[in-house]
Each structure stands twice: as C-alpha cells, then as structure tokens.
Image (cartoon, rainbow, N blue to C red):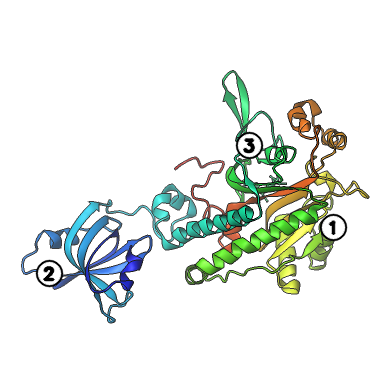
Amino acid sequence: MIKHLSGLDDGPVTVAGWVETVRDQKKVQFVILRDESGSVQLVRPRPAEDDAIATSISELTLGSFVKVTGQLKHDERVKLGGIEVKIDEFEVVGKALPENPIADDSSIDKRLDWRFLDLRRPEQNLVFRIQTTFEHALRTWWVEHDFVEIHTPKLMASASESRAELFELGYFEGKAYLSQSPQFFKQMAQPAGFGSVFEIGPAFRADPSFTSRHATEFTSVDAEISWVDSAEDVMQMHEALIVAGFTAVKEKHGDEIKALFDVDVVVPSTPFPRIPLAEAKRIVAERGYTVPRADDDMDPEGERQISAYVKEELGSEFVFLTDYASSIRPFYHHRHDDDPSLTQSYDLIFNGTEISTGAQREHRVDVLIEQAKDKGLEPEELDFYLDFFRYGVPPHGGFGMGLSRVLMLMLHLPSIRETTYLFRGPNRLLP
Ligand code: AMO
C-alpha cells in the first residue's frame, strides 16, 4: 500500500493505483498515483526517443488503474510525503475513459449516478472507514456486555411500525411486506430468554419524502434489553454505546476527520441531558420558535433549536427528549403508571436532528391489547406478536438508530446521501 512506502528503505517496490495527475514534461514525466491509503509521486526521466513506457504515460487518462515497479527513493525535496518512485516497469491495467462524468462541484444526484467514482474521493473513502470503526466499537461493547446478535427477517406478514410507510410485495399466491424495523422480533428475544440482543440491518420505509434525512431503505442499529424498570435503563445503555462508538472513531480517525472535514469529533460525557418533550417545547418557545402543533412531535426546526440550547447551556451535542405523549407514540410503548397520557420513551437528538427512538415496552398483554385497539389496530392481526407476551415475558426496552444519520451529523454533512453507500429514495433505485 502507498501509505507503507514512507516506512521502507530505498529500493525496489511495486505499487498500484489510480492516476490522479500527469505532468508530461520534455525531460521528465511525473505521475501522481493514488490507492485507498494515500498518494505517491512516480517519476521517469524521458529517453532521447519516446519508448513504450514514455508513450503510455503521455497517453494516460486520469483515473486509469496502473501497476508500477520501480525504485523507492526518500528525498525531502519531494513535496508529496518526501518520497518518490522511479519507474522501471509500467502497466496500464484498466484504462479510464477520457471524460470524467463527475467533478468536485457536481450535484449530489449526479455524483450518486456515478457513485463508484464519487466514492474514490478520500473524504468518501473516510466516511466508510469511520462507519466500520463505529459499528465495530458498538459490536465490541455489546459482546463485552453479553448481548446476543440476531438477524431478523426482512420479509414480514404485517407492518411493524405503521401501515402508512409500508412496502408491499407479491409473495407467491399472497403478499408480504418489507420490514420497517426489527421491532417485533427483537422483542421476541425477551420471552425467548436471550436477555439482551442487538442487530445492525436494513429497514424499509415507503416514505415519499425528499428530505436530507429520509431514505426508503436504511441501516437500522437496534438493541433490546430485559429487566428494565423504565426508559432510563435503556437510555443508560444507549449513551454508553454512543460513548464507545465516538471514542473509537476519535482515536482512530480524529486527525483525518479534522483534515478532510474540518470537524472535531467530540466524545460526549454522560449522562446526556434529559429533557421532557413538553419542557423542551417551552424552552424552544422561549427562544422564539413555536413548534407548529402543540400536541405533536418536535419538528426539524424545533430539534435544531433544542440542540442549540443544549449546546449553549449544557455544552452537549446530544440530548434525550423524554416522556412523549401516548397520542404520538406506537401502541407498544409503555405508558407512565401514574399518567397514561405519557410514555416511557425518548428520542435522541444529536447536533440538531433525531437519530434514534427508544422506549420501555408494554409487556402486560391485556394492557397491550387495549393500547393496540386505542390506536385503531386489530388485535387479531397482531396475534403472533401478542403471543410473545402470553407465556412469561420480562419487562424490557430498547432503541432503533439510523446509522447514516449518526455519520451525517458526526461529520457535519448535509445529507444521508453522503453517508449511505448506495442511497435509496423515491426516485433512486440505481446504481
Ligand atoms: P423510528 O421509526 O423512530 O423507531 O426509527 C428509528 C430511527 O431510524 C432512523 N430512521 C430513518 N433513517 C433514514 N430514513 C428513514 N426513512 C428513517 N426512518 C427512521 C432514524 C430514527 O430515529 N422500532 C422503533 C425503534 C425502537 O423503539 O426500538 C423505530 O423504528 O434515525
């Protein structure tokens, strides 16, 4: 790899990568070559008569993939890392078409059309190395805390979140639905006696919106734990995980993130602030913004405002908004024992946007049936799910978190299109 060259002694090396620039001069030819680890300067004095290598370099198109064997030389006069490789053998392995279909200032839609070229940019490459580190840190934390990894089916016989955003597909003689969340099946692990479970997997929402934070398919990070007394237990697990993920990212990529995105990754301290939703709305109103519908969720501007408040007043990029009204939460959320109009639930807001919803679940089957009816659902349709609660189930709770939203907000990027490997939206199924 190119990044290893600086640690080697002068002598023969072989490198391969994409041609970034060519300086085709009379006396000497220079090529800057890049692989996924970095860039290096290649150099070749021009012979009196152009030979095969000189001609190939002259005809190189940017982005072509080449393999080079030559002599590594440390020379502090070379601007790019103080090393260069003097070319002995030169092979064009994959020639690129001369016109690059995208440029640095191309629109995000155009870049997504050519995502494999877009991903070659070092910033994009870094996004997915950060994602790898982040997921690995979460998994490590879960494994160290005795969680079991599950993979729940994405083909479903019913909706898991709402009928509104449901993809339906033909399934032999009948129909099936794409899973909107592993919700039901991560809960199933509780009566199954797994204790604590997690899953990182796809979720699908037939959401027609074109916002910067909605996709029709996204990667959902989910966890569910037994024996909770309230949403507080879930929040404590959640914030510990976030700290583990951010610590790993900062340690491994902090400097590169600063260099490429000009962002300082901040490892949050715990406990994150917790603010009941009703109070958050009052705080936001005092800042001069009234959330449009008093009985509804925070809207995006409300989320930005409460985040700004928490940052300014409490120095935190994260805030848990708690105690959502039962009217705006799903039937499976546990309601407060002393006030059934409120739920044991929360949203986690990071740098101005919701990244997660979590809750204690209702585990008493008679109460659960009443709550389902309350929401206009047919208990018969949910019977397979209700059975989970009929044979002994511990009190439990968990959360779901959008992976690409976390990355977008961590890196201060404008859209999850930048932090999703291949984005899916209402008008995008390719590539
Ligand atoms: P919710 O529907 O709030 O909760 O989703 C949880 C988190 O998933 C992400 N998310 C999305 N990301 C991209 N595009 C979308 N269309 C999209 N929809 C949701 C968000 C959101 O905060 N079952 C519950 C979770 C639970 O209680 O365990 C659920 O799915 O980051």
Q: Which amino acid does label 3 sit on?
A: Ser
| Quadrant where the image shows the C terminus | top left
Q: Which of marks 2 and 3 is nearer the N terminus?
A: 2
| Nearest-to-viewer mark from 2 and 3 | 3
Question: Which residue carries the number 2 mark?
Answer: 46
Mark carried by residue 278: 1
**Circle 3 residue:** 179
- Camera-side mark, 1 or 3: 3
In the rendered structure, which amino acid carries the disc numbered 2?
Arg
| Tag 2 and tag 3, C-beta contact below 8 Å | no
Give the amino acid type for the residue marked by disc 1 in the picture.
Answer: Ala
Real-space Cα separation, disc 1 to disc 2, in angstroms: 74 Å
| The label number, if any, that marks residue 41 in the structure image | none
- As drawn, the residue found furthest toward the right would be 338
Residue ID at (75%, 69%): 309
Label 2 and label 3: CA atoms lie apart by 61 Å
Residue shown at 49% from the left, 47% from the top: 422
Q: Can residue 27 be seen in this view?
A: yes
